Image (cartoon, grey):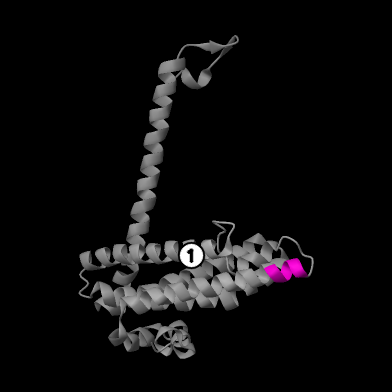
Amino acid sequence: MDLSKIASFELIKSTLFSPERAFEAEKPNSDLNIAAIRMILYCVLAFTLQFLISAGASLFGFGSVGIMSRFAGLPVLFENPLINLAAIVLVVVIFSFVCSAIFFLFARLLGGKGSFVVQTSLFFVGLLSLGLFSLVIFNPFLALVQLLFNNPLLSTLFSISLAIFQIWVLSIAIKVSHGFSIWRGLASMLVPFILLLVGIALFGIYQYFSIRSELCNQFSGESIEGYSLPFFSNC
């Protein structure tokens, strides 16, 4: 397999600086196997970097790497490094495919005509390029900003800017895949998240009133050790 088709420097640079042109050029090469390999490659590179940073920090007596461990930002799921890497790869690949499937569904509802294979392939090109950009450039830069200025607001502003850039690039991947406007590509990504947040909020409200109703039935009009329970007086 030609590695240049998976993660060439030119492909990554073009995706970051001219995403629409990069996605149009990559469209004929759409392949789910290559898409999966891209996600595996990112996980391996991120894991390797995190391992080297942790080992270097321990070697030079820093102990807990703290802020440096966020260069890669991978979770520690298991103590064994190889098992941890395998688990991360599995979770990332499955989660990425599920997200692409959800975005594909909403893109088709919004009038998209593209295929799942094309969208997922281009979407994963975006994920790999953005991931490597964060891994190699943005995360070390953000860590340096935190060390020099120790200003959470400044770090938050940089992080928000990166998130907006990531959403924009991935929206273009969906736009190119389905041949519609950038706004529909953006909606294909944002509407599922908005619906998810609304669903979580409604579930939280339902849980609050359910628990409150249950507690009201138990404690309404009662007192504990001579103290009234004003919270339940309005049940």
| Quadrant of image for the C terminus | top left
The total number of labels drawn is: 1
Residue 17 visible in rendering? yes
Q: Residue 118 location, x and y as percent?
A: 28, 78
* Image location (x, y in percent) of residue 114: 23, 75
Which residue: 25% across, 64% down? 105
Taking the image as drawn, is residue 148 in sight? no
Q: Nearer the viewer, residue 35 or 99?
A: 35
Residue 22, located in which quarter of the rendered image? bottom left
**How packed is label 1: few (under 14 Cα within 10 Å), some, or many (20 or more)?**
some
Start-end of magenta stretch = 55-59
Q: Nearer the viewer, residue 66 or 92?
A: 92
State whether residue 15 is above or below residue 231.
below
What residue do we see at 57% from left, 58% from top?
A: 76
The image position of residue 7, as x and y in percent, is 45, 84
> Would you name the residue on which mark 1 appears?
86
Query: Could you tell me the amino acid type at mark 1?
Result: Ala
In the image, is 154 to the left or to the right of 169? Answer: right
